[in-house]
């Protein structure tokens, strides 16, 4: 009987020490999942298609299928806002619904090698990437 009591005591000590560690791990996993749910993910690509509207341009940038709405989507090319292409009058901010898309045009006047593209939701930067690192797509 003394051996059984000793075994149970050891088991209780192990459980008491393991429970806080397991709780900390579970809380950490929960917090990581919350952070990932807030993050907006989307597909981004560039394509070559010369056009004159809304601006004289050779390249376009597409943003596709965000997992959450982007309320005030702005795309900057070396800190210059790019115009959305679905209107004859250039505008620089729009809402992108989940599972939809949008296209901006890169004016010839500002095109240059090594340019940085920044995707923003209002004032919050979602992603920074060099233009040449965007994947090429067909128009």
Image (spheres, rainbow, N blue to C red):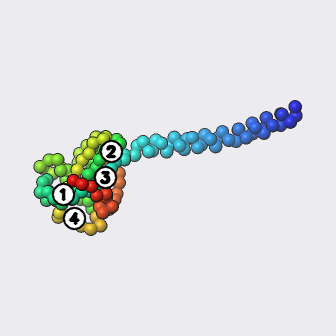
Secondary element type, mark 2: loop
- Mark 2 closeness class: few <14, some 14–19, many ≥20 residues within 10 Å: some
Give the residue at mark 4.
Answer: 111
Q: Earlier in the sequence, mark 3 or mark 2?
A: 3
Secondary element type, mark 1: strand
Q: Nearer the viewer, residue 106 or 120?
A: 106
Q: Earlier in the sequence, mark 2 or mark 1?
A: 1
Secondary element type, mark 4: loop
Mark 4 vs mark 3, foreground winner is 3
Residue 110 locus on image (x, y percent) = 20, 64
Secondary element type, mark 3: strand
Q: Which mark is residue 139?
A: none
Left or right, 26 with reference to 87: right
Residue 117 appearing in the image: no
Residue 7 locus on image (x, y percent) = 81, 37
Q: Nearer the viewer, residue 94 or 129?
A: 129
Q: Nearer the viewer, residue 137 or 121?
A: 137
Residue drawn at 46 percent across, 41 percent down: 34
Left or right, 74 with reference to 52: right
Residue 95, compared with residue 55, is above or below; it is above
Residue 108 appearing in the image: yes
State the CA–CA distance, disc 4 to disc 3.
Answer: 18 Å
Give the residue at mark 1.
Answer: 49
Q: Earlier in the sequence, mark 3 or mark 1?
A: 3
Q: Which mark is residue 44?
A: 3
Q: Which mark is residue 66?
A: 2
State the CA–CA distance, disc 2 to disc 4.
Answer: 26 Å
Q: Earlier in the sequence, mark 1 or mark 4?
A: 1
The answer to which quarter of the image holds residue 96 is top left
Residue drawn at 59 percent across, 43 percent down: 24
């Amino acid at each position: 009987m003394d051996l059984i009591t000793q075994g149970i005591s050891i088991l209780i000590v192990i459980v008491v020490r393991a429970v806080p560690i397991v709780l900390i791990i579970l809380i950490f996993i929960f917090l990581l999942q919350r952070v990932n749910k807030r993050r907006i993910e989307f597909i981004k690509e560039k394509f070559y298609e010369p056009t004159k509207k809304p601006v004289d341009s050779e390249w376009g940038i597409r943003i596709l299928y965000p997992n959450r709405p982007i309320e005030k989507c702005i795309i900057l090319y070396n800190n210059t806002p790019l115009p959305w292409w679905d209107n004859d009058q250039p505008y620089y901010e729009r809402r992108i619904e989940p599972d939809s898309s949008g296209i901006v045009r890169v004016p010839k006047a500002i095109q240059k090698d090594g340019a940085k593209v920044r995707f923003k939701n209002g004032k919050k930067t979602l992603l920074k990437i060099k233009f040449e690192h965007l994947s090429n797509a067909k128009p």
